[in-house]
């Protein structure tokens, strides 16, 4: 199998487009590289961009095309988590739309190639190609629709990334709060051990003066330790919620 990497006749949205002939003689198109069994490979960048779309304010809201951008409400950890999740979902949706666009491009090129083959069979003489032209026009219209959808998704992704940049300081504060809470809890637990010792008794416990003295001692720390454990758990949840990025 020999790989031929080339741009489609119609502009693709972004990235590299691979075209190769498989072992059965069939032409394959993909945004992803061909199988490793392909003997020869090369790379050509065929990047071209759809129209750039920016957030537009309409009334009190911002829009990317037809999509209304959500207002950021709630605690910073929740906002950051939602932004990260949305960006990942938008990126996945962009890939799906791009793959569909590639399929349309493939069908349009196949239609053009069939028209060229027909002209060759007719020795270059003109022939009625209205149906082929109409089919190609429908493809181009579909490609423009995909270009708008992809541009809209790009707009949302860039908006989300800009918002995340605005919350960079809050992310740092959340991480620092978690580390600080863990440190305070470990320090207080060690102070309890230093002041009261460790209770290593197992099985049936004899309630004697030594045990009562130990209980009185640890009670001085237990309430604060319980509160710190709750605070640390909450700080840990906030910290973990922003780690998806």
Image (cartoon, rainbow, N blue to C red):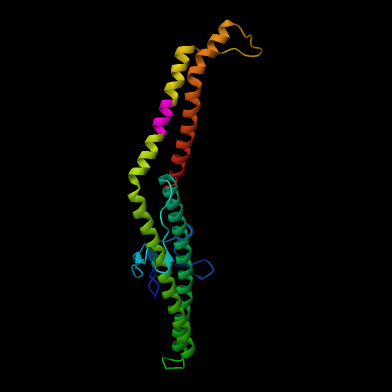
Residue at the outermost right position: 204
Q: Is residue 65 visible to the viewer in this orientation of the structure?
A: yes
Q: Position of residue 17 (x, y in %)?
A: 41, 66
Q: Of residues 115 and 199, which is closer to you in this image?
A: 199
Query: Where 152 falls versus 237 (above or below)?
Result: below
What is the quadrant of residue 125 in the picture?
bottom left
Region rendered in magenta = 178-184
Residue at the outermost top position: 209
Residue visible at 55% across and 14% down?
215
Q: Is residue 160 left or right of residue 107?
A: left
Query: Where 193 falls versus 168 (above or below)?
Result: above
Q: Is residue 10 magenta?
A: no
Numbered marks: total:
0
Q: Of residues 76 and 30, which is closer to you in this image?
A: 76
Q: Position of residue 104 (x, y in %)?
A: 47, 73
Residue visible at 43% across and 55% down?
87
Q: Is residue 17 visible to the viewer in this orientation of the structure?
A: no
Q: Of residues 125 and 101, which is closer to you in this image?
A: 101
Q: Of residues 45 and 96, which is closer to you in this image?
A: 96
Q: Is residue 62 left or right of residue 121?
A: left
Q: Position of residue 78 (x, y in %)?
A: 45, 47
Query: Where 88 falls versus 1 (above or below)?
Result: above
Q: Position of residue 70 (x, y in %)?
A: 43, 58
What is the quadrant of residue 94 in the picture?
bottom left
Residue visible at 45% across and 36% down?
235
Most common secondary structure along the magenta stretch: helix
Residue visible at 40% across and 72% down?
8
């Amino acid at each position: 199998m020999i790989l031929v990497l080339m741009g489609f006749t119609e502009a693709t949205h972004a990235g590299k487009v691979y075209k190769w002939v498989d072992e059965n003689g069939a032409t394959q198109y993909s945004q992803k590289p061909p199988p490793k069994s392909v003997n020869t490979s090369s790379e050509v960048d065929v990047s071209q961009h759809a129209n750039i779309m920016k957030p537009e304010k309409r009334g009190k809201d911002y829009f990317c095309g037809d999509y209304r951008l959500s207002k950021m409400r709630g605690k910073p950890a929740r906002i950051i988590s939602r932004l990260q999740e949305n960006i990942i979902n938008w990126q996945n949706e962009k890939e799906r739309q791009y793959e569909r666009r590639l399929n349309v491009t493939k069908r349009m090129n196949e239609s053009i190639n069939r028209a060229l083959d027909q002209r060759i069979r007719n020795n270059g003489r003109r022939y009625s190609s209205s149906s082929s032209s109409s089919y190609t026009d429908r493809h181009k219209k579909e490609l423009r629709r995909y270009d708008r959808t992809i541009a809209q998704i790009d707009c949302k992704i860039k908006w989300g990334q800009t918002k995340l940049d605005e919350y960079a300081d809050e992310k740092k504060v959340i991480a620092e709060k978690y580390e600080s809470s863990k440190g305070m809890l470990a320090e207080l637990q060690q102070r309890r051990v230093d002041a009261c010792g460790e209770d290593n008794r197992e099985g049936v416990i004899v309630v004697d003066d030594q045990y009562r003295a130990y209980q009185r001692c640890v009670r001085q720390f237990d309430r604060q330790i319980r509160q710190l454990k709750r605070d640390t758990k909450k700080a840990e949840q906030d910290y973990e919620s922003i780690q998806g990025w």
